[in-house]
């Protein structure tokens, strides 16, 4: 699969630039409206000061009425500009976060370079929290500009009353931002470290959930929980550190803003007492000193959010810039369902050679589970062609020369631990809603009893990871999904290890019948599936050591008989 994210590197700064460029129109409108909001907020104490000044001097009810009407216009402008400005910005923010979430998820569904070493839990954290925090830059920039507008308008208005008041606001704002910029760098580095530790904790949780049953089986759950407790504690301590830094930043910002507002108020009071400004100008100055704290607070918090967005974008870049485990080719498999391995060497596999003709049902009896897992990984494309010797050919074409889309349209490798998703039985069997063989797949996988148990039938709800299903039901549901896909080549890895012998026998016959004329490979030690196959390949010590029907091998090969007979 090719996308802009896999065609060239995308560092964190490039991600932020892309987000800003893509939402330029929304940001312009948002900036205009939020600037209008801040200008209206600033105009309110200015108008109030002018009203006091002219009312005390003219004492005219008509002028007072016009002044009240002007205040109503300002209040209405403030309300509407805030409402529509934030609506535009938050819509753009949410949309942009969704775009990055989809891109990160798309990369997460593809193998990434091993040197990145990101687990599924880490990718999940990046696709959710980091995507949201990166998209916040769309709101940060307009709010930063609008806050700057408010500070500038306030400085100009105070400068018109007295130059010293305007200069005090400008110098004070520059000093506050200079001090806070130092603290914001600490926030960025601390936040990045926190996100990394939270992601590691999330990855640990995902691993624990996946392997919980095996861990309970050999008593390793307590050690695993201690391991999780350790990474979780590290994430908690780092979160506390980030909270302290954020608290120090917020406290410093509030204190500095209060000092500046107090300085403006005291200076205006002194100037009024000395007769250098009027009462109306004093009211305006005091009002602006109180108001200016809000835009100054926003203005001073923006560097913090910028640093957080940069840290999150840098983490997203870890996924988006990671090259795929292999560079897909442009070709497509030829018509038919031929599958061939020629001299494959990988892991426990040693010069593995075999060929499956189109329409053939072949079973592979692997004496060692590791050999079966390595073979399934190679066929599924989880191992890059450069990581193994030899060639894997699908439809006469080498796997390295085929596009990922072409391979997935032509061949499906169903793992023994296929994931079950929250939804219904139907959506798990046919996620795309396009399969025409769902009833046949349900019957072949012997899932009919599960469907019959529930009033809703195939629309019966399934919890995440199939929590409300037994192990055998989950396995049959996964098998039904693989059969419903109706691929030219179907590879099943231990599809019946969690079902009883009678059900296993029925499944073997049904799969052979349903897949007649379609290429099917089953990596298994199940006697029922081995007997249903057209021929059996014996995989021992990484190579095919025997080939015949199941019954002939039982009669002539003692090692085979000991390995598969039950």
Image (cartoon, rainbow, N blue to C red):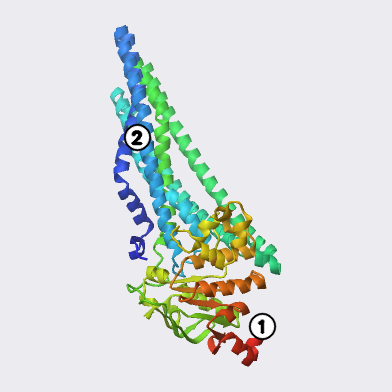
Tell me if residue 299 comes above or below residue 267 in the rendering: below
Residue topped by disc 1: 565
Q: How many marks?
A: 2
Decide: few, some or many residues near mark 1? Use Cα within 10 Å; few <14, some 14-19, many ≥20: few
Q: Looking at this view, is 344 or 555 the one in front?
A: 555
> x, y percentage for residue 476?
58, 66
In the image, taking residue 330 as reference, residue 339 lies left or right, namely right
> x, y percentage for residue 262?
44, 27
> x, y percentage for residue 242?
53, 49
Q: CA distance from mark 2 to mark 1?
A: 76 Å
Determine the residue positioned at 45% across, 51% down: 188
> x, y percentage for residue 399?
40, 77
Tell me if residue 139 comes above or below residue 487 in the rendering: above
Determine the residue positioned at 59% across, 78% down: 369
What is the secondary structure assignment of the residue under circle 2? helix
Residue topped by disc 2: 34
Q: Looking at this view, is 60 or 494 the one in front?
A: 494
The C terminus is located in which quarter? bottom right
What is the secondary structure assignment of the residue under circle 1? loop
Decide: few, some or many residues near mark 2? Use Cα within 10 Å; few <14, some 14-19, many ≥20: many
**Could you say which quadrant of the image residue 530 lies in?**
bottom right
Q: Residue 275: in sight, yes or no? A: no
Determine the residue positioned at 67% across, 86% down: 562
Q: Looking at this view, is 64 or 19 the one in front?
A: 19
């Amino acid at each position: 699969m090719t996308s802009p994210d896999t065609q060239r590197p995308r560092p964190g700064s490039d991600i932020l630039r892309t987000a800003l460029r893509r939402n330029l129109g929304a940001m312009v409108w948002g900036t205009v409206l939020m600037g209008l909001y801040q200008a209206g907020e600033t105009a309110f104490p200015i108008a109030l000061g002018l009203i006091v000044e002219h009312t005390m001097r003219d004492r005219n009810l008509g002028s007072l009425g016009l002044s009240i009407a002007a205040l109503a216009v300002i209040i209405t402008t403030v309300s509407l500009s805030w409402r529509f400005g934030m609506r535009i910005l938050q819509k753009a923010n949410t949309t942009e976060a969704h775009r990055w979430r989809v891109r990160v998820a798309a990369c997460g569904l593809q193998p990434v370079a091993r040197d990145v070493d990101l687990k599924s839990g880490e990718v999940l954290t990046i696709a959710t929290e980091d995507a949201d925090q990166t998209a916040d830059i769309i709101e940060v920039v307009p709010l930063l500009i609008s806050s700057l507008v408010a500070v500038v308008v306030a400085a100009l208005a105070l400068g018109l009353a007295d130059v010293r008041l305007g200069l005090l606001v400008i110098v004070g704002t520059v000093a506050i931002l200079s001090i806070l910029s130092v603290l914001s760098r600490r926030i960025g580095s601390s936040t990045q470290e926190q996100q990394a530790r939270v992601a590691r904790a999330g990855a640990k949780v995902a691993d624990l959930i996946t392997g919980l049953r095996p861990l309970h089986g050999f008593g390793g759950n307590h050690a695993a929980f201690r391991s999780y407790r350790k990474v979780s504690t590290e994430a908690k301590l780092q979160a506390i550190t980030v909270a302290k830094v954020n608290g120090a930043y917020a406290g410093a910002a509030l204190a500095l803003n209060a000092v500046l507002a107090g300085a403006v108020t005291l200076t205006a009071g002194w100037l009024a007492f000395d007769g250098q400004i009027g009462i109306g100008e004093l009211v305006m100055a005091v009002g602006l000193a109180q108001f200016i704290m809000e835009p100054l607070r926003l203005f001073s918090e923006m560097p913090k959010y910028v640093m957080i967005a940069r840290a999150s974008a840098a983490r997203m870049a870890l996924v988006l810039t990671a090259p795929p485990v292999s560079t897909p080719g442009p070709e497509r498999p030829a018509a038919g369902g031929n599958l061939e391995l020629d001299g494959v060497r990988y892991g426990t596999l040693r010069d593995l050679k075999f060929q499956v003709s189109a329409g053939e049902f072949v079973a592979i009896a692997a004496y060692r589970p590791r050999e079966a897992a390595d073979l399934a990984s190679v066929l599924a494309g989880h191992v890059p062609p450069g990581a193994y010797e030899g060639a894997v050919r699908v439809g006469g074409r080498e796997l390295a020369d085929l596009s990922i889309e072409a391979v997935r349209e032509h061949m499906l490798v169903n793992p023994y631990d296929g994931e079950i998703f929250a939804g219904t039985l139907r959506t798990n069997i046919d996620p795309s809603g396009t399969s025409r063989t769902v009833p046949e797949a349900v019957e072949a996988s012997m899932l009919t009893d599960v469907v019959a148990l529930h009033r809703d039938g195939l629309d019966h709800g399934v919890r995440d990871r199939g929590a409300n299903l037994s192990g055998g039901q989950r396995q049959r549901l996964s098998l039904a999904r693989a059969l419903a896909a109706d691929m030219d080549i179907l590879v099943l890895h231990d599809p019946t290890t969690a079902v009883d012998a009678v059900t296993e026998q029925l499944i073997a016959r049904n799969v052979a019948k349903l897949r007649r004329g379609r290429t099917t490979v089953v990596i298994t030690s199940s006697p029922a599936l081995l007997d249903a196959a057209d021929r059996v390949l014996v995989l021992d010590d990484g190579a095919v050591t025997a080939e015949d029907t199941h019954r002939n091998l039982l009669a002539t090969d003692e090692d085979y008989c000991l390995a598969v007979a039950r």
